[in-house]
């Protein structure tokens, strides 16, 4: 029985260290205790900024889009006007040709060729394109829409992550959280990380949405490929109990087998 007495403490110690090592292994995007979060600009962007890999629906009409208004007055339905470029519909939300913002931030459009679009807001891009087309068309009317805007959101619970398409032009953090079903019951509303930019130089903002006086920071416009990560409440005892359950079964089985062998030996004697 001496070897059993020696084995049990060793098994217990190994189980303890194994449980501590793998406590909350699913937690992602950890930051050090004294991590310096980026600060929000004094006047945050109130409009979406076009980015690389955005898919742009482009629509162009002449005469300031007068044809679109004429058709609307006659038929009572929008989106039926013949456009110069746009697949035959005057509404950028329903018609228009698709173009991608390429790796260098440019987009290749008919007649004018490549145009630097990444970094511009929608209105800025529309105004600039109207000026570029003005020598060719009389009073050009340009409509743009980004069709593939999306963000990734982790609402604070395991297996609840979602990729959300942002259909509206200016979607806020609250909009995305609502579309994802809100913060999960294990999520920390006071510790929401917004990760923006590329992985070589990400900008990490900390948002506290738990109080009214700090909720203003959550009302910001989301950009393409933003990551919203709601930190979850860590429950080490739950994870520890889950991790050591197989070990407890092994220990119980080993002790039972050992006692059976010992009883058999005693019976034989």
Image (cartoon, rainbow, N blue to C red):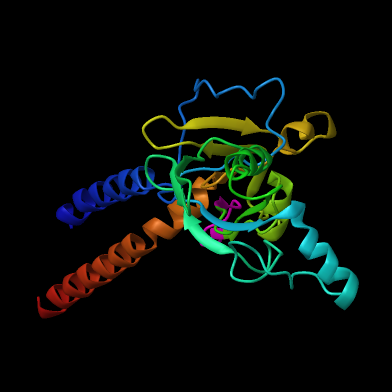
* Residue furthest out toward the left: 269
Q: Tell which of 262 and 250 is nearer to you.
A: 250
Task: Name the residue located 61 percent from the left edge and 38 percent from the top edge.
Answer: 128
Visible residue check, residue 28: no
Task: Name the residue located 28 percent from the left edge and 65 percent from the top edge.
Answer: 250
* Occupied quadrant, residue 192: top right
Q: Quadrant of the N terminus?
A: bottom left
Visible residue check, residue 179: yes
Q: Is residue 106 found left or right of 96 in the rendered image?
A: left
* Occupied quadrant, residue 258: bottom left
Q: Residue 47, relative to residue 4: is it above or below?
A: above
Task: Name the residue located 54 percent from the left edge and 35 percent from the top edge.
Answer: 119
- In the rendered image, residue 108, in percent from the top left (x then y), is placed at 44, 50
- In the rendered image, residue 46, in percent from the top left (x then y), is placed at 72, 35
- In the rendered image, residue 90, in percent from the top left (x then y), is placed at 71, 65
Q: Tell which of 128 and 170 is nearer to you.
A: 128
Q: Tell which of 75 and 103 is nearer to you.
A: 75
* Occupied quadrant, residue 216: top right
- In the rendered image, residue 14, in percent from the top left (x then y), is placed at 27, 47
Q: Quadrant of the C terminus?
A: bottom left
Q: Is residue 236 found left or right of 21 in the rendered image?
A: right
Residues rendered magenta in the picture: 151-163
What is the number of callouts on the image?
Answer: 0
């Amino acid at each position: 029985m001496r070897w059993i007495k020696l084995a049990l403490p060793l098994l217990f110690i190994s189980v303890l260290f194994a449980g501590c090592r793998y406590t909350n292994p699913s937690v992602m995007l950890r930051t050090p205790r004294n991590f310096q979060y980026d600060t929000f600009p004094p006047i945050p962007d109130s409009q979406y900024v076009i980015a690389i890999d955005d898919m742009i629906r482009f629509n162009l009409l002449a005469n300031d889009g007068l044809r679109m208004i004429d058709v609307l007055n006659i038929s009572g339905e929008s989106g039926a006007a013949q456009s110069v470029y746009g697949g035959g519909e005057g509404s950028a939300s329903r018609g228009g040709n698709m173009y991608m913002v390429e790796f260098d931030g440019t987009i290749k459009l008919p007649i004018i060729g490549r145009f630097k679009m990444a970094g511009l807001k929608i209105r800025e891009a529309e105004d600039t394109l109207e000026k570029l087309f003005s020598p060719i068309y009389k009073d050009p009317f340009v409509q743009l829409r980004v069709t593939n805007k999306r963000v990734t959101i982790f609402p604070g619970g395991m297996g609840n992550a979602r990729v959300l398409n942002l259909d509206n032009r200016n979607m806020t953090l609250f909009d995305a959280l609502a579309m994802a079903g809100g913060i999960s019951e294990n999520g920390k509303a006071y510790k929401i990380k917004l990760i923006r930019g590329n992985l070589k130089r990400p900008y990490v903002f900390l948002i506290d949405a738990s109080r009214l006086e700090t909720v203003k920071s959550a009302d910001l416009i989301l950009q393409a490929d933003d990551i919203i990560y709601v930190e979850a409440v860590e429950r080490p005892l739950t994870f520890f109990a889950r991790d050591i359950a197989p070990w407890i079964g092994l220990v119980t089985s080993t002790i039972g087998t050992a006692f059976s062998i010992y009883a058999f030996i005693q019976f034989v004697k």
